[in-house]
Amino acid sequence: MRFLNRSAGRLSRYRRGPVAGLVVLLLGLLLSGGVYAAVSPSSSASSAASDDALVKQGRELFLVGCAFCHGQNGEGQVDINGKLIGPSLAGVGAAAVDFQVGTGRMPLARPGQQGPVKRDAYSEDEIAALAAYVASLAPGPAIPTSADYSTEGMTEQEKQEAIVRGGQIFLTNCTACHNFTGAGGAMPRGGYAPRILDTSPRHIYEAMLTGPGPMDNFSNGNLSPEEKRDVIAYIQSMKEQPGYGGFSLGNLGPVSEGMFAWLVGLGICVAFAVWIAAHTTRSSKKKELQA
Amino acid sequence: MSADSSHDTGHEPGHEVINARTDALLADPGLPDHVWRPTDVDAKAEKRAERQVATLFGLSAICTVLFVVFYITLETGVDGPTIIGLGASNVALGVSLGLALLLIGIGVIQWARKLMGDHEISELRHPASSSEGDRAETLAALNAGLEESGIGRRPLVRNTLLGSVALLAAPAVVMLRDLGPLPNEVVGEYEGAGLHHTVWRKGMRVVRDVVGTPVKASDLEIGDLLNAEPEALFPTAENGLPELSGAELQIAKSKAALVMLRMDPNDIVSPVTRNWSVNGIVAYSKICTHVGCPISLNERTTHNLLCPCHQSTFDLADSGKVVFGPAGRHLPQLPLGVDDEGYLIALSDFLEPVGPSFWERNTKSPSEVAKGLS
């Protein structure tokens, strides 16, 4: 205490000095900035004032369209048997909302193993409002911008390198479920990993970031933003590639190909054989015997 | 019943009555009159058919020549030309060779249908077995041979012959035995050799597969999955590890592969899994214990890892216990720790062999296996 008093006394000698006002002003600015940074919910949140209206609009939409399963404050709901109806949305972030609602998976049309992709129920603005509301519940991943996943501004060489790197990462981490052409595949208990070739880069990025449904996430600490961008570049390049091996038959592997060979291939052969045997034109004339 | 004795000489006695009745009711009408084809009766049609067949064969020849031309001229690979979004070379080769074969086939069918003789004929079937006389003769010859060799009367000769032939297996065994050690006897040739060990060892860092970057425990979020390998596969000047190459590298890579996830620590069921995890981060061998397929098909919500080959399913919250499928034993878990800089490291090698079963392998429960970590 004595030390404090003594140093305060020493400081107060300068309180009328020429730079005292400036120092106090700087200290005040630093303090308020620091406190704001520590308290503000997410580094991605833009100015709080303009967000308020958006959050309010999002909350209204949420209460109508989402609260039935996710709870009035996004806290999640269980039925009387303790079975989860809708999970808690605290901390899922704007990215999860943009993915789930933006691809039409949410709102669910009916309960089931997995929400299928369908037509968007909300407009772009409404999705943004919902995302802002859910992001206001707890800090979570923000919606990525095109700077995060676009290869714009890269040289052709860099782009090729990104595609190669992304391909290796894709083949190691994604193919187990999504098939190595990105065509998707079956999962346990009636679930499925969706086809990802037609998914927009932003939604692919968000899926990696948030791990929708039973998918694992690939957070930025796990797979860096650059690596995510490379994976997306690879998926885009796959889409543009012509089928060098011929018709892909959905790229689902030996099951679809075998079925095609047995049913269509053999079927055509059998039908052709039957047709040949059934049609031989005959003449009503008799052959004049020459011998 | 008097009519049957006049024919039916080829029939067995039991069938005579039935044949007699049907024959009496329905006489064998014989083959219907042959109806001629236009090509049989019309010389012009015949000439036309001949030309058609020859044209088909000729077209086939053209397709074959085109196949060779396409094969030589059309470029393959990423920069090759395309037709309707498909690689031009493959499409051209497939279509030309397919047509070449198909046209020969159609030509032959056309030939047979239009020009070859198509008279209906009937051929009676003959019994397949040899005659009684031949069979008796053969048996007699065989018995005579056996009798003359005296194999029944001279047991000494028979037994020594059997013994000497049986012993001929010995040279084969001795020579094959010398080809090399059994896979489970390969130890110490290089780091992680043989079936019982991998390149993992105490203090070795976990790095991301393909990328090779070390993994900071604090970087991972709950629900993250990563495919990892030991640092030994990515030697740098910094870690000073020796460069692996060739078969050694492939073996090390295939046996040491990991699938890791970070789960909510409260979800972990088994005490062994909890002990060997860091903040809910667990690491398991990526090689299925059934027949060794690499697995990373995980369901975040259930921590169930599914092998795509035969649907073996392992519970990663419970020591990799088999919850479904043909796998016979749990997935080996790698004990994890963190080093001074916060990066994930192995606390030891796997404490049991990874991958599918082999003859000399013991089966231990996870808690028994855990006793091996001192």
Image (cartoon, rainbow, N blue to C red):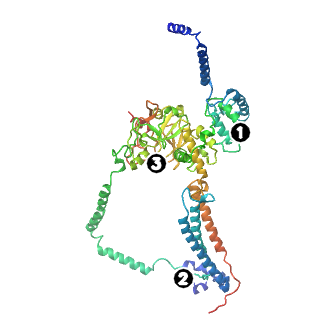
Q: Chain of mark 2?
A: B
Residue B137 shows up from this direction: yes
Give a yes or no on whether discs 1 and 2 share a subunit. no
* Residue that extends furthest to the bottom in the rendered view of this protein: A291
Depicted B18 relative to depicted B289: above or below: below
Specify the quadrant that holds the N terminus of chain B.
bottom right
Asked whether the beta carbons under mark 2 and mark 3 sit within 8 Å of each other, the answer is no
Along the viewing direction, whichever of B160 and A93 lies nearer the viewer? A93
Residue B308 % position (x, y):
53, 48
Q: What separation in Å lies between label 2 and label 3 (alpha carbons)?
A: 64 Å
* Residue that extends furthest to the front in the rendered view of this protein: A18
Q: Amino acid at mark 2?
A: Gly
Along the viewing direction, whichever of A174 and B301 lies nearer the viewer? A174
Residue A75 shows up from this direction: no
In this figure, which residue is indicated by the disc labeled 3? Answer: B292
- Classify 10 Å Cα crowding around label 3: few (below 14), some (14-19), many (20 and above): some
Dot label at residue B95: none
Q: What separation in Å lies between label 1 and label 2 (alpha carbons)?
A: 90 Å
Q: Chain of mark 1?
A: A
Residue B370 % position (x, y):
42, 35
Callout 3 secondary element: loop
Along the horizontal axis of the image, is A243 left or right of B245?
right
In this figure, which residue is indicated by the disc labeled 1? Answer: A124
Q: Amino acid at mark 3?
A: Gly
Q: Quadrant of residue B348?
A: top left
Q: Chain of mark 3?
A: B
In this figure, which residue is indicated by the disc labeled 2? Answer: B10
Image point (58%, 46%), residue name: A233
Q: Quadrant of residue B71?
A: bottom right
Q: Amino acid at mark 1?
A: Glu
Along the horizontal axis of the image, is B278 left or right of A133?
left
